[in-house]
């Protein structure tokens, strides 16, 4: 319910253009905002003074028909004095008998004239609202020094879980500019307007300017606001579809890529392991071949040495006879000029050195020594014969 002050004090021009016109503009804003917040919201309007009786006058019971609300706001006359306490009780009764009982209950009070109600009456009215789960918001327009403390009593008595607010409109500022950023319009989702002048007041010249989707007031241009809202919904749906398609394609690519990776990685690993194994096998084969060649060389040397040293008596005798024949041939064919070279083979030391240089021949072998002894005797005999023949000649 919206409670409007229609007393004579609303003729003052401290608000542009007058208090009554500024209140009317703020009431239009509140009606449109509350109706647009939820399709089930309903708004009612009453005045706190009426011609003749001077009490509250219900203009429109809670409804969602914006046409009725705007028509009622344009037919408010300025008369009498405002009675806040009785108007709050009437508003509570109107909320109690509203058609749609769903949702919360709230009373918004515009105060633009001095409040003459006693403090205890205001406190009792606030407690009654709190008991019936009715929140109250108070908007002070003028006479703020006298009314602020009293209306604060009403707000504090009705406050439950910070659901009630007090907003003071500074002189010279449009109330709608302050309310558009206040929790009164946004249902507690926005911080209350504040200023140095008092609790919940806004600084002079400060404009709320925000609070509307896309920066457009749906009350001023509902068609543009609706078009922008529909465009935003379509864009959001398009983005959601695009993101869903992107997620699906990414999931499919990840599955395919995961399969390929799982298939290719083992192949690469196996190939790497196979290459390592081939390298190891090559190294082992080289090492084995080197060991075999070394072993073959050592075995051959062993076999040669064994064959030469063990049973190669015939070879030794052949070597020995060859050496003896060479020595004998050198002695027979040699001339006197070469007697010195032929005499080398007759020298036992030279023959021993020569035999020692032959591989596999042991000069100290008994067979060789016997052969050397026989050769020496033959040489001595030959030398003796040659000496005798020389003497005879």
Image (spheres, rainbow, N blue to C red):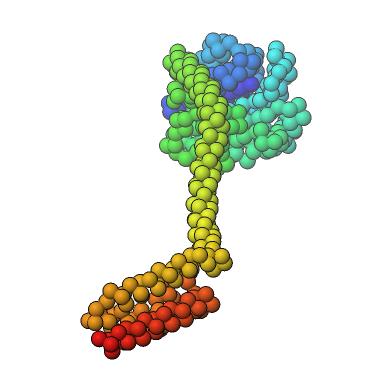
Residue nearest the viewer, comparing 348 with 49: 348
Residue 243 place in picture, x, y as percent: 51, 23
Residue at image position (51%, 22%) is: 249
* Pick the front one: 193 or 222: 222
Is residue 79 something one can see in this rendering?
no
**From the viewer's perspective, is residue 118 above or below residue 279?**
above
Q: Vertically, is 251 above or below 313? A: above
Q: Quadrant for the C terminus, please.
A: bottom left
Residue 372 position, x and y percent, is 45, 79
User: In which image quadrant can residue 38 be found?
Assistant: top right
Image location of residue 125, percent across then percent down: 72, 30
Q: Residue at x 60, y 35 (%)?
A: 166
- The one nearer the camera, 39 or 324, is 324
Residue at 39% of width from left, 76% of height from top? 354
Q: Is residue 171 above or below residue 101?
A: below
Quadrant the N terminus occupies: top right
In this rendering, position of residue 144 left or right of residue 62: left
> Which quadrant of the structure image shows residue 342?
bottom left
Residue 289 in view here: yes
Q: How many marks?
A: 0
Instruction: Please state if 223 lies on the left or on the right of 6 as rendered.
Output: left
- In the depicted structure, whether residue 320 falls above or below residue 213: below
Extreme-front residue of the structure: 392
């Amino acid at each position: 319910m919206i409670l409007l002050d229609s007393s004579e004090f609303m003729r003052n021009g401290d608000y542009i253009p007058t208090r009554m016109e500024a209140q009317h503009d703020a009431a239009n804003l509140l009606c449109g905002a509350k109706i647009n917040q939820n399709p089930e919201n309903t708004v009612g309007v009453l005045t706190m003074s009426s011609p003749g009786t001077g009490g509250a006058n219900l203009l429109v019971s809670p409804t969602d028909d914006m046409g009725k609300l705007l028509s009622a706001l344009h037919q408010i006359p300025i008369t009498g004095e405002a009675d806040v306490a009785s108007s709050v009780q009437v508003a509570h009764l109107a909320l109690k008998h509203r058609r749609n009982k769903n949702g919360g209950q709230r009373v918004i009070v515009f105060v633009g004239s001095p409040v003459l109600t006693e403090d205890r009456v205001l406190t009792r009215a606030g407690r009654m609202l709190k008991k019936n789960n009715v929140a109250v918001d108070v908007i002070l327009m003028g006479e703020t020094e006298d009314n602020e403390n009293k209306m604060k009593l009403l707000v504090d008595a009705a406050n439950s879980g910070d659901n009630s607010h007090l907003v003071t409109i500074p002189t010279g500022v449009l109330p709608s500019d302050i309310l558009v950023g206040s929790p009164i319009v946004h249902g507690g989702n926005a911080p209350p307007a504040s200023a140095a002048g008092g609790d919940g007041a806004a600084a002079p010249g400060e404009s709320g300017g925000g609070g509307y989707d896309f920066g457009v007031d749906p009350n001023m241009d509902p068609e543009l606001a609706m078009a922008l809202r529909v465009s935003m919904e379509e864009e959001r749906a398009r983005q959601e579809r695009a993101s869903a398609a992107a997620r699906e394609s990414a999931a499919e690519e990840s599955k395919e890529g995961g399969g390929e990776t799982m298939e290719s990685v083992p192949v690469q690993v196996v190939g790497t392991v196979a290459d390592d194994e081939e390298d190891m096998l090559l190294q082992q084969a080289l090492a084995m071949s080197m060991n075999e060649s070394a072993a073959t060389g050592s075995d051959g040397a062993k076999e040669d040495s064994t064959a030469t040293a063990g049973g190669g008596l015939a070879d030794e005798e052949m070597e020995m006879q060859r050496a003896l024949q060479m020595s004998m041939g050198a002695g027979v064919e040699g001339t006197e000029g070469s007697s010195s070279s032929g005499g080398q083979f007759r020298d036992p030391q030279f023959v021993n050195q020569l035999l020692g240089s032959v591989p596999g021949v042991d000069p100290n072998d008994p067979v060789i020594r016997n052969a050397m002894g026989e050769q020496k005797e033959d040489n001595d005999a030959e030398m003796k014969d040659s000496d005798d023949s020389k003497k005879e000649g």
